[in-house]
Structure formats: C-alpha cells, structure tokens
Image (cartoon, rainbow, N blue to C red):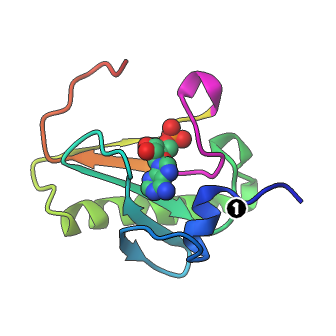
C-alpha cells in the first residue's frame, strides 16, 4: 500500500490541523503556509490523488465540494470575494497528492497567478 499522505493523516486525526469545517464527505482546515489572510484547504475524505484521478462515480462528491465552497467562504467572512484554486500535477504546482481546493481571500488577489 502506498504511504499515507499528510492530508489523510489530518483526516484520521494523526496530526493536528486548524479545522474550520467538516461533514460526512469533506474536511476544511487552514493552510499551514497561508498565502492570503484567509487560506483554507477543502479536501474530500475519500482518497483521490488529484483532479486527474476523479472517477465518473465521484460526480456527486465533486458537486458537493463545489456546493460547500461558497458556504465555507461565507462562514469565514469572505464577503468581498475569494479565489478557489486546484493545483494538478507538477506543472500545476501540486505538492500533496490528495485532491484539495485552496480557498483564498481577505485581500484583493492579483491575476494572472505566477
Ligand atoms: P498544493 O501545492 O496545491 O499541493 O498545496 C498543498 C498545500 O498544503 C500548501 O499550500 C501547503 O502549505 C499546505 N500544507 C502542507 N502541509 C500542511 C499541513 N500539515 N497543514 C496544513 N496545510 C498544509
């Protein structure tokens, strides 16, 4: 079996995280190296390595994550807007091989990203 990712260990409460939201299917916690005043990662509890690894039977889960994002943003007080990012693969800058959506806000964010 491949080694557990750091995010799987957070789901299993083996390492601490500042959890801001949890339900049956997903977990959100503050990024350890925040790139904005608010920087949260939303992850599915199911082990999915990246966006490329979503299967057709994951469509409900993917939709659920999308529905949670605006509720989470509201809960975190991001009334002026926010950005969501999914890094995928080496060129996308993905470091942790467990699907995660970055939710960033609390300041005006520049575009395009680096
Ligand atoms: P990515 O580059 O899209 O794979 O993003 C991985 C993110 O996970 C980075 O922003 C890291 O700062 C964050 N990260 C890594 N380890 C932890 C941790 N233990 N708790 C919270 N965030 C983490």
Name the residue located 59 percent from the left edge and 21 percent from the top edge: 91
Q: Which residues are magenta?
A: 89-100
Q: Is residue 104 visible?
A: yes
Residue 49 spot, x, y in % from top left:
69, 49
Residue located at (64% from left, 64% from top)? 8
Q: List x then y, in percent, for residue 110.
A: 21, 24
Identify the residue shown where x is 37% and y is 73%: 21
Would residue 19 be found to the left or right of residue 10 on screen?
left
Magenta stretch contains residue 14: no
Quadrant containing the N terminus is: bottom right
Which residue is situated farthest in the right direction here?
1
Asked whether residue 60 appears in the rendered view, the answer is no
Residue 90 sits in quarter:
top right
Residue of label 1: 47
Q: Is residue 15 left or right of residue 108?
A: right
SS assignment for the magenta stretch, majority: loop
Residue 94 x %, y %: 57, 35
Residue drawn 49% across and 66% down?
64
Q: Quadrant of the C terminus?
A: top left
Residue 93 is inside the magenta segment? yes
Relative to 33, 3 lies left or right: right
Q: Position of residue 73 (x, y in %)?
A: 25, 60
Quadrant of residue 20 within the rendered picture: bottom left
């Amino acid at each position: 079996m491949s080694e557990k990712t750091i995010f799987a260990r957070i789901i299993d409460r083996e390492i601490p995280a500042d959890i801001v939201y949890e339900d049956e299917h997903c977990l959100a916690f503050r990024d350890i190296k925040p790139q904005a005043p608010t920087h949260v990662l939303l992850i599915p509890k199911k082990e999915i390595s990246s966006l490329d690894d979503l299967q057709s039977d994951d469509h409900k889960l993917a939709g659920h994550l999308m529905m949670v994002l605006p509720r989470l943003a509201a809960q975190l007080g991001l009334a002026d807007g926010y950005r969501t990012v999914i890094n995928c693969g080496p060129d996308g800058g993905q470091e942790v091989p467990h699907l995660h959506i970055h939710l960033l806000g609390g300041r005006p964010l520049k575009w395009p990203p680096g």
